[in-house]
Image: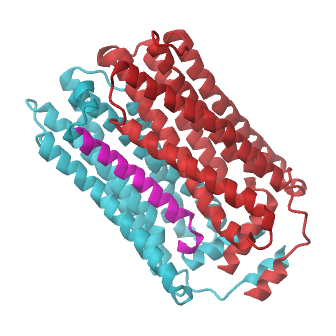
Chain colours: A cyan, B red
C-alpha cells in the first residue's frame, strides 16, 4: 500500500489550483462554462425574483410597528439570499475558482458565508418580531422546525469550518491529518445545510402562498401564485445544477482530485 | 499515466463486494452498524408514523365516491412509502449489501425501485381523482410542481438505469466505458430525485397541516400538528443520515473505491 502511494506522488505545486487547464478539451470547457453560467444566473435570479415579488405584490419593505406585513417581507428575501444565493455560491466556489490558490478559495468561502450570516440572523429576527407584533405563536410549523435545524447546522458548520480550516492553519503540519479527515464530513453537512435551507424556503413559500392568497385564489392560478411557484421551481433547478456540478469529478481542480485519489488508496 | 494505472491493478475478484471486511477496525464497524441501523429505523419509522397519523387522526383509507377524504389519505401514505422508504433503501443498498455480488445489488436496487413505482403511480392517481371529485384544480401548487418534477425524474432514472445497467449487460465489454461514465450522472440524479421526493413530501405535509387543521389550530400546536411535523422532521433526519452515509468513503465497498481511484487517476 505504502509502495503504491509513493509511486503515485508528483512534485508539489505550492497548493494551487492551476495547471490542469491544458488537459481540458473544448467540449468539456463548454459543458463547464454552460453549467457554471446557468448556476450563476439561477442563484442571482432567485433572489431577484423574490425581490420583484415583494415589491410588485407585497408592498415592499419596512421595519415599523404599524407595518408588520412589510417587515415580514424581509424574512423571505433575506432567507433566500442567505440560504440559497450566498450559500449556493459558497458551495460552488471550489469548482468556480479553480485557478486560485487554495487558501484564497477558503477565504472566499468564509466571506460568502459571512455575507449569508447577517441575512439569516436579520431574516430570523424579522419574522420573530412580526409574530410577536401579530400575536402569532413561534415555532409551531414544519417550516419553522426545518428552518431551525438549518440555522443550527449553518452556525455549527461555520464555527467548525472557521476553527478547523482557518485557525488551525497556525499549526499547519500538525493538524493536516485532522483537517483532511474533516473535509468529507464538512462537505457532506455543508450540502445537507444547503438542502435543508432550500427545503425550509420551499415549505415557507407554500405557507405564504396559502396564507396570503387563500386556498381559492391559489388554486385559481393567479399571477402571484405562479410567481411564488416560480421562485420555488428556481430553487429546485438550483438543487439540480449544484448537484450535477458537484457530481462531475472532471469539474474538481486537479489537486483536489489527486488528494481524493491518495485518500482512496490509503483507506 | 498508463504506467501508474497498471501498477495499481490487483487480481480480479469476480466483481463481488467481498473481502475488505478484514481490513475494518472495531470502531469503524460500530459507526457503520450504528448509522445503517439508524437509517433503517428512520426509513421504516417514517412510513409507520404516516400510517398511524392517517388511522388515528384522518379516519383510515377507502376508495369510493362518498369518501373522497379517506381516498386522499392514500396519497401521503403511498408517496412517503415510494419516494422516501423504498427509494431511501434503494439508494443505501450499495452501502448495505457490501458482501453481495454487484449484479445482485443492482437487481435489488431495481426491485426496490419497482416497489416504489406502483406506490407513486397509485398515490398520484388517488390525489388526481380526489381533486376531480371535489372540483379542485390540479397542478396549481408549488407542492404539485415539485412532485411532478420528482415523478418525471424518477421515471427517467428508472428507464435509463434499467436500459443502461441491466439490459446493456448483454454486451458487457462493449458498453463498459459508456456504463462507467454514466454511473456518477445516474447517482447524482438519483440523489436529486430522492431529495426532490422529500421536498415534495415536506411541502405536501405543510399544505395538509394548514388545510386540515386551519392556521389557528396548527399554530396552537395541537397533537395532530405535532405528529405531522414529526413526520417531516423524520424525513429531514433521513436526509441527514443518508447524506452522511454516502459521504463516508470508508462505507463504500472496496471494489467501488478502487474503481473511483482508477477513474480519478485516468481523468
**Quadrant of the image occupied by residue A210:** top left
At 62% from the left edge and 74% from the top edge, which residue is drawn?
Answer: A257
* Magenta stretch: includes residue B255: no
Check the image and name the residue furthest to the left: A66
At 27% from the left edge and 47% from the top edge, which residue is drawn?
Answer: A78
Q: How far across and how far down the image is residue B98, in percent?
A: 81, 50
Foreground: B32 or A162?
B32
Tell me: residue B137, above or below residue A167: above
Q: How far across and how far down the image is residue B103, in percent?
A: 81, 54
Foreground: B116 or B23?
B116
Residue B124 visible in rendering: yes
Foreground: A179 or B104?
B104
Question: The N terminus of chain A appears in which quarter of the rendering?
Answer: bottom right
Q: How far across and how far down the image is residue A138, in percent?
A: 32, 25
At 38% from the left edge and 32% from the top edge, which residue is drawn?
Answer: A144
**Quadrant of the image occupied by residue A133:** top left
Tell me: residue A22, above or below residue B178: below
Secondary structure mostly taken by the magenta-highlighted segment of the chain: helix
At 73% from the left edge and 70% from the top edge, which residue is drawn?
Answer: B175
In magenta, the rendered stretch is: A225-251
Left or right of A92? Residue B35 is: right
The total number of labels drawn is 0
Amino acid at each position: 500500500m505504502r509502495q503504491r502511494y509513493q509511486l503515485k506522488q508528483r512534485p508539489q505545486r505550492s497548493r494551487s489550483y492551476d495547471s490542469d487547464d491544458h488537459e481540458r478539451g473544448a467540449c468539456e470547457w463548454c459543458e463547464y462554462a454552460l453549467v457554471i453560467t446557468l448556476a450563476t444566473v439561477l442563484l442571482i435570479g432567485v433572489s431577484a425574483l423574490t425581490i420583484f415579488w415583494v415589491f410588485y405584490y407585497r408592498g415592499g419593505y419596512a421595519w415599523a410597528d404599524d407595518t408588520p406585513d412589510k417587515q415580514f417581507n424581509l424574512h423571505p428575501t433575506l432567507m433566500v439570499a442567505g440560504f440559497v444565493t450566498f450559500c449556493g455560491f459558497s458551495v460552488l466556489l471550489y469548482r468556480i475558482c479553480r485557478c486560485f490558490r487554495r487558501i484564497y478559495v477558503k477565504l472566499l468561502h468564509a466571506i460568502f458565508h459571512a455575507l449569508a450570516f447577517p441575512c439569516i440572523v436579520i431574516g430570523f429576527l424579522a419574522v420573530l418580531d412580526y409574530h410577536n407584533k401579530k400575536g402569532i405563536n413561534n415555532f409551531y410549523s414544519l417550516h419553522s422546525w426545518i428552518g431551525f435545524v438549518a440555522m443550527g447546522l449553518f452556525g455549527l458548520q461555520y464555527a467548525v469550518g472557521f476553527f478547523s480550516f482557518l485557525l488551525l492553519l497556525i499549526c499547519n503540519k500538525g493538524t493536516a491529518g485532522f483537517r483532511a479527515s474533516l473535509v468529507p464530513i464538512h462537505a457532506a453537512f455543508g450540502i445537507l445545510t444547503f438542502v435543508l435551507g432550500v427545503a425550509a424556503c420551499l415549505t415557507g413559500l407554500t405557507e405564504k402562498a396559502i396564507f396570503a392568497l387563500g386556498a381559492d385564489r391559489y388554486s385559481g392560478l393567479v399571477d402571484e401564485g405562479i410567481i411564488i411557484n416560480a421562485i420555488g421551481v428556481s430553487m429546485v433547478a438550483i438543487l439540480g445544477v449544484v448537484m450535477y456540478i458537484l457530481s462531475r469529478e472532471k469539474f474538481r481542480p486537479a489537486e483536489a482530485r489527486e488528494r481524493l485519489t491518495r485518500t482512496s488508496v490509503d483507506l
